[in-house]
């Protein structure tokens, strides 16, 4: 089974989580806190948090936003799972830091992605170029079959 590359993510509570500690976790990356699609995604995970917990999963959301911005995001929407700031080029290591284009302007940003690890830390499933609508429901169904 494929493993995640080595990395660290700084959580909004000042803790740091290493990729080697990510077992039975849904780790999702969103492009920018406080924006429409990202808010829907973060809140969808929050609404289903107890269902994931019953299946033994932890949820971690991550972006390139600062810790301060992610704290405000979590407080504003009463998020009860950790958000993280990618200060260690994790997006690049995972291949989800991509060139984008808006109104003819090119820039780099996060490709909305989700990673599900099993109880041994192996990568069970990966979703890339995620569409927010229905995504959390799909992850929840997949989680039911993850060891």
Image (cartoon, rainbow, N blue to C red):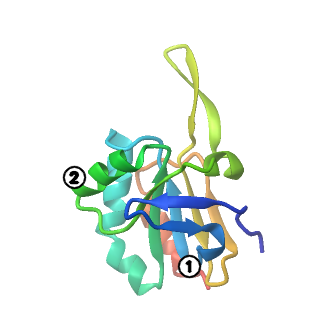
Q: Is residue 130 above or below residue 109?
A: below
Q: Is residue 77 above or below residue 1?
A: above
Q: In front: mark 1 or mark 2?
A: 2
Identified at 34% across, 45% down, the residue is: 69
Query: Could you say where residue 61 lies in the image, as x and y percent from the top left?
Result: 45, 59
Q: Is residue 130 above or below residue 141?
A: above
Identified at 33% across, 78% down, the residue is: 50
**Foreground: 15 or 47?**
15
Image quarter hosting the N terminus: bottom right
Identified at 67% across, 83% down, the residue is: 120
Direction from residue 132 to residue 8 in the image, left or right: right
Query: Could you say where residue 45 lies in the image, as x and y percent from the top left?
Result: 37, 64
Query: Could you say where residue 132 lies in the image, as x and y percent from the top left?
Result: 43, 50
Image quarter hosting the C terminus: bottom right
**Foreground: 144 or 5?**
5
At numbered mark 1, what does the secondary structure look like: helix, strand or loop?
A: loop
Q: Tell me the residue that label 1 is attached to.
A: 24
Q: Tell me the residue that label 2 is attached to.
A: 76
**Of marks 1 and 2, which one's residue comes earlier in the chain?**
1
At numbered mark 2, what does the secondary structure look like: helix, strand or loop?
A: helix
**Foreground: 17 or 102?**
17
Query: Could you say where residue 75 lies in the image, as x and y percent from the top left?
Result: 24, 56
């Amino acid at each position: 089974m494929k493993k995640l590359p080595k990395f660290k993510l700084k959580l909004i509570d000042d803790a740091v989580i290493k990729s080697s500690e990510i077992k039975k976790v849904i780790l999702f990356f969103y492009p920018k806190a406080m924006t429409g699609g990202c808010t829907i995604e973060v809140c969808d995970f929050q609404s289903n948090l107890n269902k994931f917990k019953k299946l033994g999963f932890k949820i971690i959301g991550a972006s390139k936003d600062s810790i301060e911005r992610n704290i405000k995001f979590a407080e504003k929407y009463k998020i009860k799972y950790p958000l993280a700031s990618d200060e260690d080029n994790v997006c690049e290591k995972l291949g989800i830091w991509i060139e984008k284009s808006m109104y003819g302007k090119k820039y780099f940003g996060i490709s909305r992605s989700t990673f599900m690890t099993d109880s041994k830390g192996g990568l069970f499933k990966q979703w890339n170029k995620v569409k927010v609508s229905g995504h959390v429901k799909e992850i929840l169904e997949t989680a039911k079959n993850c060891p």
